[in-house]
Amino acid sequence: MQRGIRGGRIVDVGCGVGNLYPLISPLFDEYVGVDAIRYDGLPAGVQFVPFELNSGILPLPAASFDVVMAVETIEHLENPREFMRQLVGLVRPGGWVIVTTPNQLSFLSLLTLVMKQRFSAFQDVHYPAHLTALLEIDLL
């Protein structure tokens, strides 16, 4: 999918309740959501694939999506590097892989690391949901 052209396929890995669906789905022909369970409130238009992301290979065909996104998902996983490899395997040549995670290099996070010996998004209150603090270099 080229910039400014609508259509194609997108997969939202770790889609949760589908908060991005109303914003993104009009830009694509097909929107696929993947998560451990189908959460209440997930829009009916989402083609949902149930899958526990820590359990193995994503059950989707390789090189079949124009955009693969995982928004605030990777920090919840036991093996984020394997997860990144899987995401890259899902995208078509020339497509996009979009991954977001808490910013460990923000002033707040670095100050919290100095003061409490943990990044701000990885305090006891966030465990066991937030497992892996990542830096940009970890995602390359």
Image (cartoon, rainbow, N blue to C red):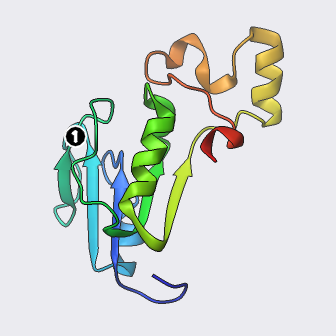
Would you say 61 lies left or right of 78 here?
Answer: left
Q: Which residue is mark 1?
A: 51
Q: Position of residue 135 (x, y in %)?
A: 69, 36
Residue at the limit of the structure toward the bottom, as seen here = 5
Q: Position of residue 73 (x, y in %)?
A: 45, 40
40 or 24, which lies in front? 24
Above-or-below relation of 72 to 52? below
58 or 133, which lies in front? 58
Residue at image location 81% in from the left, 11% down from the top: 115
**Quadrant placement of the N terminus:** bottom left
Image quadrant assignment for residue 11: bottom left
Image quadrant assignment for residue 6: bottom left
Number of disc labels: 1
| Local secondary structure at mark 1 | loop
Would you say 21 lies left or right of 133 here?
Answer: left
Q: Residues within 10 Å of mark 1 (few under 14, many from 20)?
A: some
Residue at image location 35% in from the left, 84% down from the top: 7
The residue type indicated by label 1 comes to Phe
Above-or-below relation of 124 to 129? above
Image quadrant assignment for residue 82: top left
Would you say 63 lies left or right of 108 here?
Answer: left
Q: Position of residue 125 (x, y in %)?
A: 52, 14
Residue at image location 36% in from the left, 50% down from the top: 13
